[in-house]
Image (tube, helix red, strand yellow):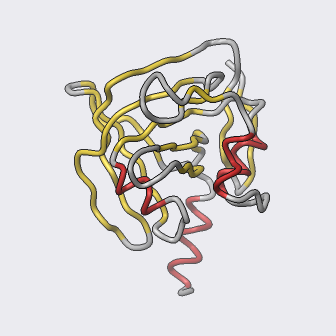
Amino acid sequence: MTEAQRRFRAAMANLSAAVNVVTTDGRHGRAGVTVSAACSVTDSPPTMLICVNRSSSSHDIVMANGRVCVNVLGTDQEELAMHFAGATNVPTSERFGAGSWDFGAYGVPVLRDALASVVGRIVTRRRQGSHTVAFVEIDAVTSRLDSGALVYFQRRFHSLTA
């Protein structure tokens, strides 16, 4: 790693980010991956972007299925974030055993107690370095207000309350 890369990574550790689990299901299988690089783009039409590391075992499945749910995690869902980040050695096929999931309503796994679940389809994608940046046009949204947010800052999870 170059000095510029090290400095960039250190600076980005100071960029607080919501913790999300991006899920998919379809012809290419069911998968999910924890991402902190997700944000709104526009409300006309409602669109988000997500960045998925190409080395993730879920990357190719997410991109091939083309339909996703961005599940925004609450303060009590750190363990779930760790499972889908691959940090707990839980195999991909068993990660959906944690949490309460709705597998039928939208055609992709939706975390029932997520702060927000945003369902849509990938309409544009671009490879950039180690990641794929995907733009997702939104079809459905659910949300709740009874929890704080799980955020990632300084390479650790933190709870943020309103």
Q: Is residue 49 left or right of residue 147?
A: left
Q: Nearer the viewer, residue 38 or 112?
A: 112
Q: Quadrant of residue 21?
A: top right
Q: Residue furthest left?
A: 44
Q: Does 66 appear above or below 57?
A: above
Q: Residue furthest front?
A: 27
Q: Residue at x 54, y 24 (%)?
A: 116
Query: In the rendered view of the protein, which quadrant contains the N terminus?
Result: bottom right
Residue 58 x/y as whole percent: 52, 59
Residue 81 x/y as whole percent: 69, 45
Residue 123 x/y as whole percent: 23, 45
Q: Does 95 appear above or below 158?
A: below
Q: Residue at x 57, y 73 (%)?
A: 7
Query: In the rendered view of the protein, which quadrant contains the C terminus?
Result: top right
Q: Residue furthest bottom?
A: 2
Q: Does 34 appear above or below 100?
A: below
Residue 48 x/y as whole percent: 35, 38
Q: Residue at x 41, y 48 (%)?
A: 50
Q: How many marks?
A: 0
Q: Does 9 appear above or below 142?
A: below
Q: Quadrant of residue 80?
A: top right
Q: Residue at x 76, y 41 (%)?
A: 78
